Image: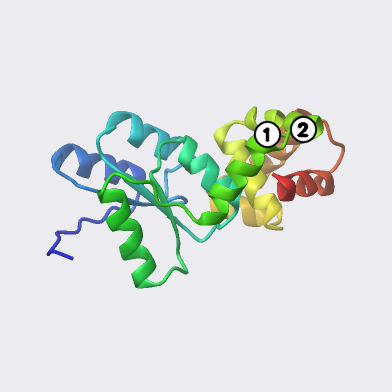
Amino acid sequence: MPAAEFLQADSVSQLERLLMDCCGADLLLMDLHMPGADGFSGLRNITQCYSQLPVIIISADENLSVMLEAQRNGALGFVSKSASISQISLAIETVLMGELSFPSELERLAQTAQVNSDASKNIVNEQVEQLTPKQFAVFSLLADGLLNKQIGYELNITEATVKAHVTAIMRKLKVNNRTQVVLIANKV
């Protein structure tokens, strides 16, 4: 791989300042949970403002629904923080060649979703799609088994805000408890 210049940002606001100053960037490797990301809104804002800049999301969250949401919000690739250097290099090369680079499981999930005409699953998917980006982030962390306090820490929000999101998620999914939310999240 040719020599490259790397710039680093510790938050979305710092990233936006860097991108304004350095409009010739070839690729952005973005941590999904960097400070100021606010769920997927940070990614969505970057991909809308810098539509020519390819973005690869890097995250420890390997939930397929998170990867799919990253793709829906403009990411061209997704790499796990546990990926090897060769996997990261391949993802970078693939995206720089104009191709998408997501784990093969995501492609199978997308194909299965197209083939599967089960009405109840489609209803659940429609309900999940109605979640706001912040609610979806809470929803994904619930699926990982995190407690409200842990979710608050991960998303840099208060525990009371997490509880409000969980209540809104239960209302939108038409379920009565957190366990049912987790069951739905693991099916999506």
For the point 27% across and 39% down, the residue is 16
Query: Splitting the image into 4 quarters, where does residue 48 fall?
Result: top left
What is the residue that sits farthest to the front in this orientation? 115
Image coordinates of residue 9 in percent, x first then y, are 28, 52
Percent x, y of residue 146? 68, 57
Look at label 2 and name its amino acid. Leu
Is residue 186 or residue 171 the one in the foreground? Answer: 186
Identify the residue under disc 1: 128
Task: Note whether residue 158 is visible.
Answer: no
Residue 120 located left or right of residue 165: right
Question: Is 74 on the left or on the right of 114, as rendered?
Answer: left
**In this rendering, is residue 79 above or below 12?**
below
Left or right, 12 with reference to 153: left
Question: In what element is the residue under mark 1?
Answer: helix
- Amino acid at the residue labelled 1: Val
In the image, 71 versus 104, the foreground residue is 104
**Percent of width and height locating residue 24:** 13, 42
Which of the image's four quarters has the C terminus? Answer: top right
Image quarter where the N terminus lies is bottom left
